[in-house]
Image (cartoon, coloured by chain):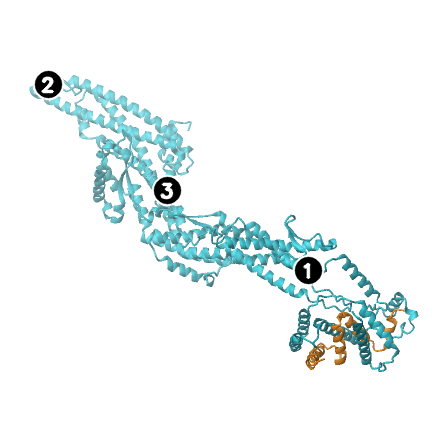
Chain colours: A orange, B cyan
Amino acid sequence: MDPEAARSARESLDLAFHMSNILDTGLDRHTLSVLIALCDLDLNPEALAAVVKELRREPSPSSTMPTAPP
Amino acid sequence: MDEEDQTKLIDLVKELVNRLLAESPQQQNPKNPNFEASLRYAVRILSSRLTPSIAPDAAAIAESIKRRLATQGRSSDALTFSDLFTKFSAKTGTGSVNNKWAVVYLLKIISDDRKSSKNAVNSSNLLPNFGLDGHGFSNGSNVSNGKENKELGWRNNGVLMVSKDPENLREIAFKEFVNVVKEENEVSEEVIVRDVLYCCQGIDGRYVKFDASVDGYVLLHSVKVPRATRIMVRKLCELGWLFRKVKGYVSESMDRFPAEDVGTVGQAFCAALQDELLEYYKLLAVLEAQAMNPIPLVSESANAGNYLSLRRLSVWFAEPMVKMRLMAVLVDKCRVLRGGAMAGAIHLHAQHGDVLVHEFMTRLLKRVCSPLFEMVRSWVLEGELEDIFAEFFVVGQPVKAESLWREGYRLHSGMLPSFISQSLAQRILRTGKSINFLRVCCDDRGWADAATESAAAAGTTTRRGGLGYGETDALESLVIEAAKRIDKHLLDVIYKRYKFKEHCLAIKRYLLLGQGDFVQYLMDIVGPELSEPANTISSFKLAGLLESAIRSSNAQYDDPDILDRLRVKLMPHGTGDRGWDVFSLDYDARVPLDTLFTESVMARYLKIFNFLWKLRRVEHALIGAWKTMKPNCITSHLFTKLQHAVKLQLLSTLRRCQVLWDEMNHFVTNLQYYIMFEVLEVSWSNFSNEMEVAKDLDDLLAAHEKYLYSIFEKSLLGERSQSLYKSLFLLFDLILQFRSHADRLYEGIFELQSRTMESSLSSRDKSKSRRQTKDKSSEPGSWLSDGRKALTQRAGEFLRNMEQELDAIAKEYKSLLEGFLAQLPVQQHVDLKFLLFRLDFTEFYSQLRPNV
């Protein structure tokens, strides 16, 4: 990755992070970068959002467990 | 997806799950047993939703976020966000984010979810926290049955927790529903919504197109959608059909305008319609902008459709639909109408109980009627008929000055809108007519002051374009003020400057023979002339005689202007007419008074004049007869010289003559008294009173008309008393005949007397007398007398003849008079009863004929 692309990627990440903060998503920078990478892989953003919500909301891990299919 | 991507994806998901779990305070340990489960769960979620539910449009999402921030009162954040977004989307090239809309959308959903979960946490003291209450999740076998769990939830808490539905039963059901919908609908709803929006602007959409065969917009048959959707689209697209109609009318009218006369009202109507369409365009634009925004849903089911569904659209369209329908109805109605008729037709639609409709119509009418009201204003205040398209309810015709008032302008009832009452329209008509009359006929400029004054009095509403529909009161007050002043001014001009009253009086005095001495002189002077055959009479000579009659009577002190107008007029005559039959006086009423004294009015005056003139002539003749008849020395002297038999005969003849004269005189005098006093003076007095109270020229005209009519009716000139009038003229003729007989009688008597003298002389001077009689004898038919005996014989014969003739006249007179008197009570007019009473005061005639 050339320095130009890296700089551009960082700036994009900065901007996205800024927006994320304004929207009060509660995502940290790293998570956001992972999510952006996933988006770039053409994953459905709705599904990603669902994952974020499901995994984050449960204060205790066990709460998600019963929902797992047998 | 190739292998590399696949592994990258797995890594990333792992990382993500790790990060997310790491956020929770208890989940520090990556070796957490839950990690595997969470990872599986995440993968399952990710694989379950392969395509996003909305169209990829980063700008629309950003717009929606911005708007939400703004509505939450965080406008500075909104600005910052839009700034960031612009920068973000400007980043292109390697290293930048490719799938920008996905990122933004992701952020938005996360933010939304967080907000809703925060709310849930905030309210957790109210809602049971399923996770903490220890039921049914630690031992999965227990709660594998979702229904049981749900019932448990119901039992335990009395609250159904949909979001916590452990098996996502509802969500699964909803997803199934979505799938079914997707299967049924070949095209998604938002596409149809977009098409419907297009159709409502009169443009064919991709799937919804105009079908000429059904005359409406329909969803293409090739597209597979449920019947309900099809019907709904059809219903919604009615708006498009209506829009096409209205739009078509407007553009058609606009195209026609320079070539054909659409009319100012029609143009105003088009303009008003266009304004309404503008409102409609605005609404459509807003709807279109909204169409892309998703509905903010509380439910986390991610399949929140776009803001606009067909159902929402039908709600949005409810009001414009009503308006558009109204406009379409109006357009249909008004296609053939113009001007006032158009305004009237629209006004009929404004009488509506629905407030929405009423307000809409009032707004429209205000625009439509403004040219009409402007016309009324300028007509009432300036007398200008600014009506190039013949839309006004007052129509002008080019006429001569004297008929300007009567025929120059009239109401066009077809153009009279129903919100202007007939009486108001009449008043409007008259006010403008008065102004024009003043301007054209009276050559007067004073009306302008009156108009300005009335405009000031009516208040500020009179400025140009100040009047509008719905302000009929203001219009009425303006018209009333203007009418009051203009009419007053007009009457002032007519009375003071053109001396209408004086002229009326002059007509009464000269044409209706009110000025006794003048009539007497005239009768004396023109009498001999008029006895000639009509074709030998020169009107110039008569004019000269008229002049001398004026100069020798009190009429000479009258206004010279009035005397100038008095002329002699000879009627068209046939063979055998005498001068008496064709002579009449005429009065030259010039502009503007010829509006009042029109030709027909003058013809009636002439008819009255002829009648009165005849009456006067008869009276004059009777008086002339009296002059010869009155007892004098000649006749009394004769008696002494005559033989007894002849003397008796003479006496009886004379007596008969006197009685007949007396009877005739009684009739004529009473008739004349009745005409002069009970008809002319009473009518004149009424007319004077009405002239005083007359408020406008129409009143004056009506009063004058009434005056003439009453004279006409009462003097037996009317249609209904034709037979009476005829018998009256027969009586007159008979009286004139009587006069000539009486003249002959007295002539004979005078001659007889002179013979008697002569014979008495001749007895004294026989030789002289004889020579004289010899000369006389050569003349045939003369009073040839050889002696006293022959003379007496001649006298007896003459007197017998005369007596017979007088008898015949008396008999005819009696029968005629009886006929006249018998007809008199049959007349409708109450005043004629007085005439009868007067004639039959001593009940002489009624006793003669007891059957009456």
Residue B772 against residue B458 in the figure, above or below: above
Disc 3 sits on a residue from what chain?
Answer: B
Mark seen at residue B774: 2
Amino acid on which disc 2 is placed: Lys
Q: Sequence-wise, which precedes: disc 3 or disc 1?
A: 1
Q: Quadrant of residue B39?
A: bottom right
Q: Which element is circle 3 on?
A: helix
Q: Which residue is mark 3?
A: B708
Amino acid type assigned to the residue bearing label 3 in the image: Leu
Q: Nearer the viewer, residue B851 or B819?
A: B819
Q: Depth-wise, is mark 3 or mark 2 nearer the camera?
A: 3
Q: Is residue B618 shown to the viewer in this render?
A: no
CA gap, disc 3 and disc 1: 80 Å
> Mark 2 belongs to which subunit?
B
Q: Earlier in the sequence, mark 1 or mark 2?
A: 1
Q: Quadrant of residue B242?
A: bottom right
- The secondary structure type at the circle numbered 1 is helix
Characterize the local packing of mark 1: few (<14), some (14-19) or many (20 or more) Cα atoms within 10 angstroms.
Answer: many
Q: Nearer the viewer, residue B327 or B306?
A: B306
Please provide percent x and percent y for residue B402: 35, 47
The image's mark for residue B193 is 1
Percent position (x, y) of residue B509? 29, 44
